[in-house]
Image (spheres, rainbow, N blue to C red):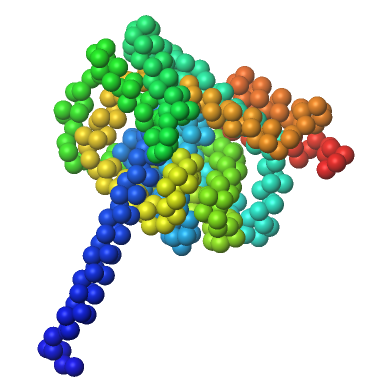
């Protein structure tokens, strides 16, 4: 048949149907991707707002990090990456001490730790992480992350800055905003059905924001002055060895949490992602996304449990929807007014949500000890957990010269050292 010979009508109709089906499937994937981003949105933007980073940069790096993760894992795992709450306290301290640029060098190094761990997993197997970081180490470190942030949550809930030094909203007004926001989050978490159950943070922020507007504590000046199109305020890292040594131990808890997230998504989809593409690939993807995020001034990336819940609920296991979610996040990052809206969220609104959020983090650490039946009646386990908790919550700091190790960083190091040095239990 020559090139000019027309195709039969049946063939043309078949081709049109295939094109329409492909377009419809693409639209479905875009819609599903938007839904996944909506689920992750509340937690995604809350972290940079708390730590003083740019929310638009966080959106951009979450999208870019997810694309990198999908590339490393060969597009096999339906996972979305975004801001890690484990780094809230260290980033807050880092920004106050070394500035955003200096803190980013520490976060870049934390990403490298992930990648080194991925190599160790590839060589030594998954058991390597469990031996180095057993539940008796990880549990109290995660508890310190949540409990150490408790004063910040309370201060913001009563209208003050995170450290309590500045009053932004009157005490009574702040409580009339933060407590309903907290209550809305609690009710959605426990009573809602379907997709709504997956967005408690977003619902709480919405209720709190509306109340803040009613009480006249929302300033819309930033929204009016912001352009529709705006390049996010990227910040390049500046080398600071203090920040590097401070941030490296913080990577311990999120790395272990990553293993749990991959197990969870494996159970949801019925596929063993620990074997294919392999934990070493998923862990490397997390690390690469975190280091690249730091190059732009964004927060560290981690796998999002909320999105895993959405995957389980919708039964949509196609990793392509995460790619669309990432693309939508990148596009939103360049909408200037969108970022300005986020900046108008009052501290009392965020404080109300954070009371539950930080308490939940501490509960995860406690659940780690319970689920793995860590026997706290044994002196070895009791020593590790006790010293780690008191060092972290009490504010213990070790330092020499201008360098100081404290908070989650110190707890991670102390817990690992105690676990390695104290005599093993008889049954071990």
Which sits in the foreground, 17 or 269?
A: 17
Residue 118 location, quadrant: bottom right
Q: Is residue 224 above or below residue 227?
A: above
Q: Is residue 362 left or right of residue 61?
A: right
Left or right of residue 212: residue 357: right
- Up the image or down, 366 lies above or below 326; here it is above
What residue appears at the point 71 percent right and 24 percent down from the top-left corner?
A: 386
> Whole-percent x and y of residue 335?
22, 40
Is the N terminus in the top left, top right, bottom left or bottom right quadrant? Answer: bottom left
Q: Quadrant of residue 200?
A: top left
Q: Looking at the picture, how far across and down is residue 324, in whole percent?
A: 33, 53
Q: Residue at x 36, y 28 (%)?
A: 203
Image coords of residue 117 (percent x, y): 60, 51
Q: Which residue lies at the image location 52% right of the left edge and 43% below the top edge?
A: 110
Residue 232 can be seen, yes or no: yes
At horizontal 34% and vertical 44% (from top left) the residue drawn is 35
User: Does 9 sit above or below residue 300?
Assistant: below
In the displayed image of the protein, which residue is found farthest to the right? 426
Residue 100 in the image: x percent, y percent? 40, 34
Observer-nearest of 351 and 416: 351
- Quadrant of the image occupied by residue 147: top right
Whether residue 51 is visible to the viewer of this picture, yes or no, is no
> Looking at the rendering, in which quadrant would you find the C terminus?
top right
| Between 29 and 138, the one nearer to me in the picture | 29
């Amino acid at each position: 048949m020559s090139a000019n010979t027309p195709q039969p009508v049946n063939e043309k109709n078949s081709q049109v149907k295939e094109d329409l089906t492909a377009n419809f499937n693409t639209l479905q994937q875009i819609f599903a991707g938007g839904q996944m981003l909506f689920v992750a949105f509340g937690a995604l933007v809350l972290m940079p707002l708390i730590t003083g980073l740019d929310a638009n940069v966080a959106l951009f790096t979450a999208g870019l990090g997810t694309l990198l993760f999908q590339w490393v894992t060969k597009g096999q795992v339906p996972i979305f990456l975004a801001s890690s709450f484990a780094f809230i306290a260290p980033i807050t301290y880092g920004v106050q001490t070394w500035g955003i640029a200096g803190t980013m060098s520490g976060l870049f190094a934390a990403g490298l730790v992930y990648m080194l761990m991925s190599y160790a997993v590839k060589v030594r197997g998954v058991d390597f992480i469990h031996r180095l970081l057993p539940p008796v180490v990880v549990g109290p470190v995660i508890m310190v992350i949540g409990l150490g942030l408790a004063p910040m949550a309370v201060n913001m809930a009563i209208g003050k800055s995170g450290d309590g030094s500045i009053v932004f909203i009157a005490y009574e007004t702040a409580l009339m905003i933060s407590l309903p926001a907290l209550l809305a989050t609690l009710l959605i978490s426990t009573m809602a059905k379907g997709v709504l159950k997956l967005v408690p943070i977003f619902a709480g922020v919405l209720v709190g924001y509306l109340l803040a507007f009613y009480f006249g504590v929302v300033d819309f000046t930033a929204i009016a002055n912001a352009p529709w199109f705006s390049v996010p305020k990227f910040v390049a890292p500046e080398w600071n060895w203090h920040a590097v040594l401070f941030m490296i131990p913080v990577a311990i808890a999120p790395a272990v949490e990553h293993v749990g997230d991959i197990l969870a998504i494996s159970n949801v989809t019925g596929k063993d992602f620990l074997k294919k593409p392999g934990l070493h690939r998923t862990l490397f993807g997390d690390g690469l996304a975190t280091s690249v995020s730091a190059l732009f001034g964004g927060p560290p990336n981690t796998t999002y449990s909320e999105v895993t819940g959405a995957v389980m609920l919708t039964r949509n296991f196609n990793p392509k929807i995460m790619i669309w979610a990432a693309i939508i996040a990148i596009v939103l990052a360049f909408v200037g007014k969108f970022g300005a809206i986020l900046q108008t969220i009052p501290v009392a609104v965020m404080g109300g949500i954070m009371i539950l959020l930080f308490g939940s983090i501490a509960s995860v650490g406690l659940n780690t000890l319970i689920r793995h039946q860590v026997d706290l009646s044994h002196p070895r386990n009791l020593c590790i957990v006790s010293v780690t908790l008191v060092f972290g919550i009490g504010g213990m700091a070790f330092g020499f010269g201008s360098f100081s190790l404290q908070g989650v960083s110190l707890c991670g190091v102390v817990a690992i050292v105690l676990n390695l040095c104290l005599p093993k239990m008889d049954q071990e």
